[in-house]
Image (tube, grey):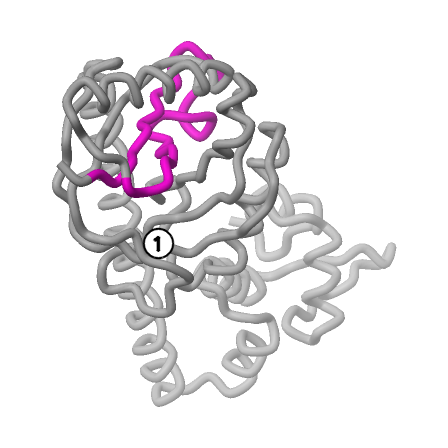
Amino acid sequence: MKNYYKISEISKLYNIGIDSLRYYEKLGILNPHRDTNGYRLYNLKDMYKLNIIRDLRILGFSMAQIKEYLDSQSVRNTRKLLHRELELLGLRQEELRIKVNTIQEKLAALDAALNIPELALTVKTLPRRNCVRLNEYITRDEEMDFLIKKLHQKHEDKIRSLETQTICAFLSLPDLSQGISNVYTSVFFILEQDTPDSDFTLPAGDYLSYYYRGDYGQNADRLTELFKLAGSKDYQIIGEPFEIYAIDNRDTIRTEEFLTEIQVLIRS
């Protein structure tokens, strides 16, 4: 086994850029020797330090923290560092657990959505639902996507994941009554029940539910169908209709796979 290694060999062995190795030297963490031609030569002590740097960088330690540890390495400081590593690994485990749960929830929601019959009117008895909202006159899908991102950014502390977030939009009834589809007055998120500081609340009660598949250009016709079916069953509509996006462009680029639910509060 060689005692010294060139910078190119160390870079390849540790998959670290040469510029990073020079930066570590500038910080005083590494102190390579120089051969007669001025080339950097790294010894086994440098390689030992690179192992520590790699492991601690993965856990998010800053270079200043790593240098401080290496400059004052002792049993006491090593024990302190190991306890901190355990804390960080515990946080990573919790993050992974949350991610696994999020993926499982998303899979369950997609599986359920794939089995939902469309164009069938049902009544759902739903609890009070807290929501956050952005009011904006929306006429294009690009505007909707932008506002969803803006709303998410504004309330990121209340939302676990945009992947599983229930996204909704209030339909523009004046436009829909004229046969103009895909027009909205606001976008909103339905929050988890224990989430505080909402913008408004969907009241508890009976809601007509009507699903359709495909693009949003058909929602004027679908809402007309919903109103006709509601009238035939003597349901009195007392709320403002809105859409819930069960399958959308977060899940597929194929508009024929989109699944949208129209909900509206009724008195039966």
Residue, disc 1: 160
Vertical arrangement, residue 108 with respect to residue 30, above or below? above
Q: Residue at x 38, y 78 (%)?
A: 81
Magenta includes 202?
no
User: Is the residue 105 above or below the residue 201 in the image?
Assistant: above
Identify the residue at horizontal 55%, vertical 46% (top origin): 149
Question: Looking at this view, is 255 or 117 the one in front?
Answer: 117
Q: Position of residue 6 (x, y in %)?
A: 70, 50
Image position, residue 185 (x, y; %): 53, 41
Instruction: Choose between 8 and 77: the one closer to the eye.
Output: 77
Q: How many marks?
A: 1
Q: Position of residue 86 (x, y in %)?
A: 29, 70
Query: Based on the displayed image, in which of its 4 quarters is residue 103 positioned?
Result: top left
Which residue shows up at 53% across the image and 17% down it? 179
Q: Say which residue appears at 39% left-offset and 48% top-offset.
A: 189
Q: Is residue 62 above or below residue 99?
A: below
Decide if residue 112 is on the left or right side of residue 51: left
Q: Secondary structure at mark 1?
A: loop
Percent from the top left, x then y, of residue 243? 38, 33
What type is the residue that disc 1 sits on? Arg
Q: Quadrant of residue 169?
A: top left
Residue 246 lies within the magenta run: yes
Q: In front: 41, or 217? A: 217
Q: Residue furthest top?
A: 256
Label 1 crowding class (10 Å Cα cut-off): few <14, some 14-19, many 20+? some
| Image quarter in which the C terminus is found | top left
Question: In this picture, which residue range is highlighted in magenta?
Answer: 238-266
